[in-house]
Image (cartoon, rainbow, N blue to C red):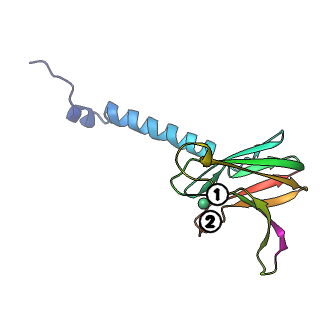
């Protein structure tokens, strides 16, 4: 009788089955990719347009560096709810003690078509700003990003 390698014989040999090893390798690759993409490295944007994707509940990229001056902020809603992006200056407060809102895009709607993309034009001095979605409690749910102007 010829002994055929089986799932059980692989376990008895002390080596994990091939499928498990492949799975572990895939997980390690995924972990590497996830940490690579989620790092704190800011995305540098040159030129006059900052393009952002919005969904539930994120503004991506989450950290962006742009040159000072006139900037067009263009958002694309790739989510399922409505979103916008406003620029807040945390170093200044409004009448109610909230970070000063410098303005932002109109509401971008979900789905397909031009209503999923909205733009705002702002002139920004060097500093650190916060990008937020001002709809409902989206900011509290994590829909914010950091904008570094240099
Ligand atoms: Cu939102």
**Magenta segment includes 92:** yes
Of tags 1 and 2, which is closer to the observer? 1
In this picture, is 78 found above or below 1?
below
At x 59%, y 69%, the residue is: 136
Q: Tell whether 15 sits left or right of 46.
A: left
Task: Mark 2 and ligand 1: say if the CB distance to the nearest ligand atom is below 8 Å.
Answer: yes
| Residue 135: image tag | 2
Using the rendered view, name the quadrant where residue 18 is placed: top left
The residue positioned farthest toward the bottom in the image shown: 96
| Residue 16: percent from left, percent from top | 33, 36
| Crowding near the residue tagged with mark 1, few <14, some 14–19, many ≥20 C-alpha atoms within 10 Å | many
Q: Which residues are magenta?
A: 88-94
Q: Tell whether 17 sits left or right of 89.
A: left
Which residue is more in the foreground, 20 or 10? 20
Q: Which residue is mark 1?
A: 107
Q: Are marks 1 and 2 in contact (CB under 8 Å)?
A: yes
């Amino acid at each position: 009788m010829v002994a055929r390698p089986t799932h059980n014989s692989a376990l008895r040999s002390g080596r994990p089955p091939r499928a498990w090893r492949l799975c572990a390798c895939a997980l390690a690759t995924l972990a590497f990719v996830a940490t690579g993409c989620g790092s704190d490295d800011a995305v540098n944007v040159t030129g006059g347009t900052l393009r952002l994707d919005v969904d539930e509940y994120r503004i991506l990229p989450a950290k962006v560096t742009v040159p000072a001056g006139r900037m067009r902020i263009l958002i694309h809603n790739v989510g399922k709810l409505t979103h916008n992006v406003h620029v807040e200056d945390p170093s200044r407060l409004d009448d109610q003690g909230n970070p000063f809102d410098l303005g932002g895009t109109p509401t971008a709607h979900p789905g397909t078509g031009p209503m999923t993309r909205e733009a705002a034009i702002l002139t920004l001095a060097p500093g650190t700003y916060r990008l937020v979605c001002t709809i409902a409690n989206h900011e509290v749910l994590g829909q914010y990003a950091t904008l570094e102007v240099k």
